[in-house]
């Protein structure tokens, strides 16, 4: 014990630092893990978002190119139709004018769509479209003169249409097919790129997840170890405090016992030795007085000694009774309680009513003392603090219990606020014998104190 | 006249010696033995058959009150005088219940012991004047505190007469002879007295009489 003491503060200090350090590490670890998770989330979301945008953009681009091609094809088809109609059917100048306007508008639309498409393309992809535009330009320049022909020259027109325009038409269609093929290639290329990006993304995710998982695993392990250590130390502390509590209780018990033992020893000493010696002295003085026949200073002196000794006897008896009443040991609890009631009543004017029911003379020593001291303390409180007029003390013995109740009609108190040393002492005595003490009090009413002490079975056997 | 045989019991040697010196000076008394604990007293009382046992309350092995109980049971003719330091009712009551006929305070033993021995040997009760006074005072105080009516007023004059004779230690038959009535009538009166005074046994009746100053 004594060797352990000096290094206890040091050890606890070191443990405190270590605890602080590991706590910091844990906080940092959990922080890092959370951050990592957050980074993974943000990164994944961003990648997925960019991926979706990119994908949509490619598809829209392709779609718009396909649409342009479609428009070019439709333009070709329609323009050749218009040209044919112009040559074969229409001779009415008004209808001819309508056809001419229609052609012009088709030409404008197609050229505009193609120009817009070329402008939206990157330089590398422009080439087939520019070729298409040239071809188309050439086509328009070929088809244009047909509408300048007069109705008589329509045969020539027919020849131009059949031999030249249609051929060009087919060529352009071939180019559009080519462009379409390029488009398809590009689509496949885009798909491939997307797959590549996805694979990269998966790889990165896997890597980060693996790192996070391993890190989490280490962290979990550390936390468990830390928690277990903490738990163990808490348990140790708990046991230590329990032990301390037990020791304290034991100490207080021994203190109470020692006090009682000392009181009894001093009381006995006063009563048996001092008291008896004084009584013997009185007897001797009386014997001397009787032996001396004549009156005078000798007899007066003896009388004085006698008075002094009588006073001493009274003094000593009262002191001894205050320390520990001899009735408790000579006559038992009932007699001692009755005596105490009478004494308190005589001293304070408070009416003390003492009732004992079936209380055995052979109660265990500890129980006798406990009940006596509790009633003593309670009566003291009744007269000192409660200013009671009446007190009722009831002690009753049942097969396995000894019950005590002390009730007064004085000023009560609030038991949840008042914790006097007297009450603590009573509680201590009662709990040492495994009993229960209950205080029922209210400033408006008096106080009812109840004690329930379990009795060891041996004492109940000897009940008389 | 035959000498009274006295057995002396006290665990305190000096006290015992003082008592013995006091008794030895009396021509009509003879101390037949001395004991220093309760058990020894019980044994000697049985073998020596003394007329009076003078005994301390607080003695080792067996205390005076327990010893008195045994002595009176085994030989009712033996009168027991209890010596005590306490004038308290508890002790007096226990002594009376145990069958003691006299109760003396040690500090007044010198003055009263001889009268006590003579009284109990004639089958009368004896108490130290101080004991009677204290018991009476206590009784009056309790009556005052509780504002109770003195139950003694409930007794008829014949009942009071009988109470005094009984408290002095007389048997029903002796009372009957003294008052010239039948012992059956005495028994009836005795029942009434106990009932009116709320008493339960002869010891309580004696104690009551002492408190009231009817006997001393």
Image (cartoon, coloured by chain):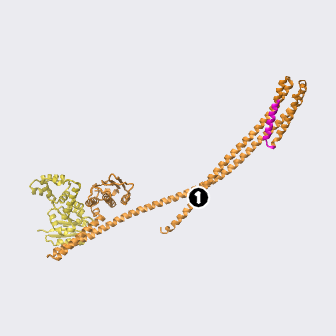
Chain colours: A orange, B yellow
Return the chain for callout 1.
A
Apparent side of residue A76 relative to residue B163 in the rendered image (left or right): right
Label 1 residue SS: helix
- Residue identifier under label 1: A24
Residue A174 is situated, as x and y percent measured from the top left of the image, at 84, 35
Apparent side of residue B124 relative to residue A239 in the rendered image (left or right): left
Q: Nearer the viewer, residue A53 or A96?
A: A96
Apparent side of residue B134 relative to residue A117 in the rendered image (left or right): left
Image quarter (top left, top right, bottom left or bottom right) of the N terminus of chain B = bottom left
Q: Nearer the viewer, residue A328 or A52?
A: A52
Is residue A114 highlighted in magenta?
yes
Q: Main secondary structure of the magenta part?
A: helix
Crowdedness near tag 1: few (<14), some (14–19) or many (≥20) residues, C-alpha within 10 Å:
few
The relative height of residue B61 versus residue B160 in the rendered view (above or below) is below
Apparent side of residue A415 relative to residue A170 in the rendered image (left or right): left
Is residue A43 highlighted in magenta?
no
Query: Image point 28% across, 66% down: which residue?
Result: A320
In the image, farthest residue toward the left: B180
How many numbered marks are there?
Answer: 1
Residue B123 is situated, as x and y percent measured from the top left of the image, at 15, 62
Q: Nearer the viewer, residue A323 or A363?
A: A323
Residue A19 is situated, as x and y percent measured from the top left of the image, at 56, 60
Residue A268 is situated, as x and y percent measured from the top left of the image, at 29, 67
Image quarter (top left, top right, bottom left or bottom right) of the C terminus of chain B = bottom left
For the magenta stretch, what is the residue range?
Answer: A103-123
Quarter of the rendering containing residue A419: bottom left
Q: Evaluate whether residue A406 shows in this view.
A: no
Q: Evaluate whether residue A387 shows in this view.
A: yes
């Amino acid at each position: 014990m004594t060797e352990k003491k000096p290094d206890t503060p040091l050890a606890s200090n070191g443990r405190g630092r270590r605890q602080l350090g590991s706590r910091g590490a844990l906080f940092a670890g959990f922080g890092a893990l959370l951050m990592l998770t957050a980074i993974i989330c943000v990164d994944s979301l961003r990648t997925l978002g960019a991926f979706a945008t990119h994908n949509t953009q490619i598809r829209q681009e392709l779609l718009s190119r396909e649409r342009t091609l479609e428009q070019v094809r439709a333009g070709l088809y329609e323009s050749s139709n218009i040209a044919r109609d112009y040559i074969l059917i229409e001779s009415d100048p008004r209808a001819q004018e309508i056809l001419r306007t229609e052609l012009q508008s088709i030409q404008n639309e197609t050229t505009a769509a193609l120009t817009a498409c070329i402008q939206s393309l990157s330089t590398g992809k422009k080439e087939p479209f520019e070729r298409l535009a040239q071809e188309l330009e050439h086509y328009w320049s070929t088809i244009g003169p047909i509408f300048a022909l007069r109705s008589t020259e329509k045969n020539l027109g027919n020849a131009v249409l059949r031999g030249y325009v249609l051929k060009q038409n087919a060529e352009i269609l071939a180019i559009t097919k080519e462009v379409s093929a390029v488009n398809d290639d590009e689509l496949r290329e885009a798909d491939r790129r997307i797959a590549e990006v996805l694979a990269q993304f998966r790889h990165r995710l896997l890597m980060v997840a693996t790192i996070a998982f391993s890190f989490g695993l280490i962290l979990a392990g550390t936390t468990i170890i830390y928690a277990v250590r903490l738990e163990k130390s808490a348990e140790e502390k708990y046991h230590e405090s329990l032990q301390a509590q037990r020791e304290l209780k034991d100490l207080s018990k021994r203190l109470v016992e020692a006090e009682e033992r000392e009181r009894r020893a001093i009381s006995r000493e006063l009563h048996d030795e001092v008291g008896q010696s004084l009584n013997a002295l009185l007897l001797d003085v009386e014997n001397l007085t009787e032996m001396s026949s004549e009156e005078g200073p000798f007899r007066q002196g003896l009388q004085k000694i006698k008075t002094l000794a009588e006073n001493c006897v009274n003094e000593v008896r009262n002191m001894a009774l205050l320390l520990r009443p001899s009735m408790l040991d000579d006559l038992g609890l009932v007699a001692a309680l009755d005596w105490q009631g009478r004494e308190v009543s005589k001293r304070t004017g408070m009416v003390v009513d003492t009732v004992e029911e079936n209380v055995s003379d052979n109660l265990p020593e500890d129980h006798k003392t406990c009940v006596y001291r509790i009633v003593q303390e309670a009566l003291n409180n009744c007269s000192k603090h409660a200013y009671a007029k009446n007190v009722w003390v009831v002690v009753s013995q049942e097969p396995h219990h000894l019950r005590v109740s002390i009730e007064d009609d004085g000023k009560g108190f609030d038991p949840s606020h008042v914790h006097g040393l007297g009450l603590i002492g009573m509680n201590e005595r009662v709990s040492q014998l495994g009993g229960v003490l209950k205080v029922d009090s209210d400033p408006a009413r008096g106080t009812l104190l109840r004690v329930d002490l379990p009795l060891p079975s041996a004492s109940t056997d000897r009940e008389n | 006249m035959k000498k009274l045989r006295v057995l002396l019991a006290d665990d305190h040697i000096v006290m015992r010696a003082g008592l013995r010196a006091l008794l030895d000076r009396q021509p009509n008394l003879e101390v037949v033995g001395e004991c220093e604990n309760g058990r020894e007293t019980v044994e000697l009382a049985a073998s020596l058959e003394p007329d009076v046992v003078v005994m301390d309350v607080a003695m080792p092995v067996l205390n005076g009150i327990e010893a008195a109980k045994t002595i009176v049971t085994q030989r009712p003719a033996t009168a027991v005088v209890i010596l005590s330091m306490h004038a308290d009712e508890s002790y007096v009551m226990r002594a009376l219940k145990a069958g003691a006929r006299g109760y003396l305070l040690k500090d007044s033993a010198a003055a009263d012991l001889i009268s006590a021995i003579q009284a109990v040997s004639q089958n009368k009760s004896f108490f130290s004047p101080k004991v009677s006074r204290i018991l009476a005072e206590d009784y009056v105080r309790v009556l005052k505190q509780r504002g109770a009516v003195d139950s003694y007023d409930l007794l008829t004059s014949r009942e009071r007469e009988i109470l005094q004779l009984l408290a002095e230690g007389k048997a029903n038959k002796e009372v009957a002879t003294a008052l010239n009535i039948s012992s059956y009538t005495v028994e009836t009166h005795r029942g009434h007295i106990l009932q009116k005074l709320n008493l339960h046994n002869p010891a309580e009746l004696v104690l009551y009489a002492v408190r009231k100053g009817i006997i001393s």
